[in-house]
Amino acid sequence: MESEDQEGANEEAILPASMCPPAHGQDGDSCGSFVLLDYTAYFADRSYATTASCKMRDGKGFIHVTFYAAAPPLVSYFCVHFTGGLKLSHFATEPEIVDSEGGIVLLRAPLGDQYHSLDHDISEYFIYHVGAMGEDPSLTQLPHPRPYELLDHQTSIMRHCANDYHDCSHCKYTIASLIPHMGKSYHLVLFRSDAMACSRQTILLAVKNARPHASTSMTITIGGKRGTMGWVDLWRGILFCDVLTADGQHTLRFVPLPPPHVEDKVFDRISRDIAVVNGVIKYIGLQVRVVPGSSFGCGAYTLDGWSPAQWSMQITDTLSKKFKLDYVLDASDIPDTLKLKVDAGTAQPTLKTLHIGQPILSLQDDDIVYLLAKVDHRDEDCNGWVLAVDTKSKKIRGVSEFGVQRTLGLSLVYIASRISEYLKVTPGNHIIASYS
């Protein structure tokens, strides 16, 4: 039984904005083959065609998860509700998305003392599935991986199926987490859906001149019969591992990432993203230019432009291709047609002066990159925006408001996900789960 002090502390740890989800995503509009998906769930008692529920393993309540999809640059999101003996004060903080692959999403819900919210031992893990072959969405609580950990940015999902296509009713999956151990050795933690259990193997990066990861920024999934996954340090390179090897002997391969496209001290901050699109690994680096005399150290700075550059690498069996530069773009190349809704007394920002970060690559082959924008990166009260920038035509293709009350600066707050590819919109404007 939780104490009154813990109950009060936990409820205070939940941001007020997390109790007020956006209004979009409820009308059943088509959202295309991919979405921008908020990392952090909202708490709301909502029910929709995408709602899935499960009884907690301890029998003390039910958890209900609903997905709301919207076309980019709007950001899609999850809502979480609870009934039975489960209360808001049981949550140390908001549930978060660990990874999304196809129609499957891995969610982590920290249930316990909010002072230990970063302790994965108090977290419970759930698989949300939008449904397959006309089936209803489902929510499954996984056995806890202890004594192992599924760390947020180091964990990825691999779907594998005996059929030629994925996401059928018999589709299996493997959850993999790669954790630095000692020197160039790593612990590979694997959770297999057929066994509903975790295992761990220690593997060595036995490649000359390969620098071990300082940390993993994100993961990518290549797939194939060997089940190739990549753990990405966006400032160094990618560690690839085949997690579905027949003999169970896993090895690591290292592929370096390109250096920054501008070696100039006026570019003081870099944001990066990587994605797999139509058999190609795309990698983008966004560098921002500050007015001389501005400083990131004190938090205040004046922007004087920004420049994204993209590289791509064709995926082969050996992953031996080199990254090639696709383009370098500058904000000054884009016609400034923005008319943003800003607070009274705030000057209308320009493309060059907007604080820009978090580039997210489109998962369609359409040359679009999505950028998070704020008048001031420190502001957590006013709304920000998501800009859809066409890097080929050098135009702004769309702008949507984005509530930044749950955003620290311009840090990563949403990801690109293909979950919407497995949603079908009926003529009555209700989303149902279906394989397409």
Image (tube, grey):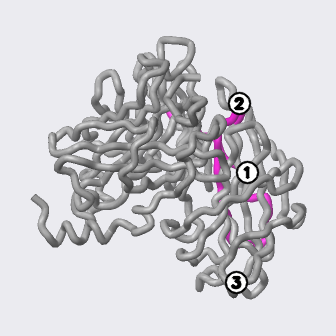
Q: Are marks 3 and 2 in contact (CB under 8 Å)?
A: no
The secondary structure type at the circle numbered 1 is: strand
Q: Which span is picked out in magenta?
A: 251-280
Give the x, y percent position of residue 257. Answer: 68, 48
Q: Nearer the viewer, mark 3 or mark 2?
A: 3
Q: Of the residues shown, which amino acid type is indicated by label 1?
A: Val
The residue identified by callout 3 is 346
Give the x, y percent position of residue 338. Answer: 80, 67
Residue 207 seen in render: no
Disc assigned to residue 433 = none
* Residue 112 shown left or right of residue 332 in the figure: left
- Residue 396 among magenta residues: no
Neighbour class for label 3 at 10 Å: few (<14), some, many (≥20)?
Answer: few
Considering the image in quadrants, where does the N terminus appear?
bottom left
Q: Is residue 355 above or below residue 40?
A: below
Give the x, y percent position of residue 168. Answer: 48, 18
- How far is the residue under mark 2 from the one under mark 1? 16 Å
- How far is the residue under mark 3 from the one under mark 2? 42 Å
The residue identified by callout 1 is 369
Q: Of the residues shown, which amino acid type is indicated by label 3?
A: Thr
Give the x, y percent position of residue 345. Answer: 69, 87
The residue sitting at the left extreme is 1
Q: Of the residues shown, which amino acid type is indicated by label 2?
A: Asn
Neighbour class for label 1 at 10 Å: few (<14), some, many (≥20)?
Answer: many
**Residue closer to the observer: 337 or 191:** 337
Q: Nearer the viewer, mark 3 or mark 1?
A: 3
Disc assigned to residue 278 = 2
Q: Nearer the viewer, mark 2 or mark 1?
A: 1
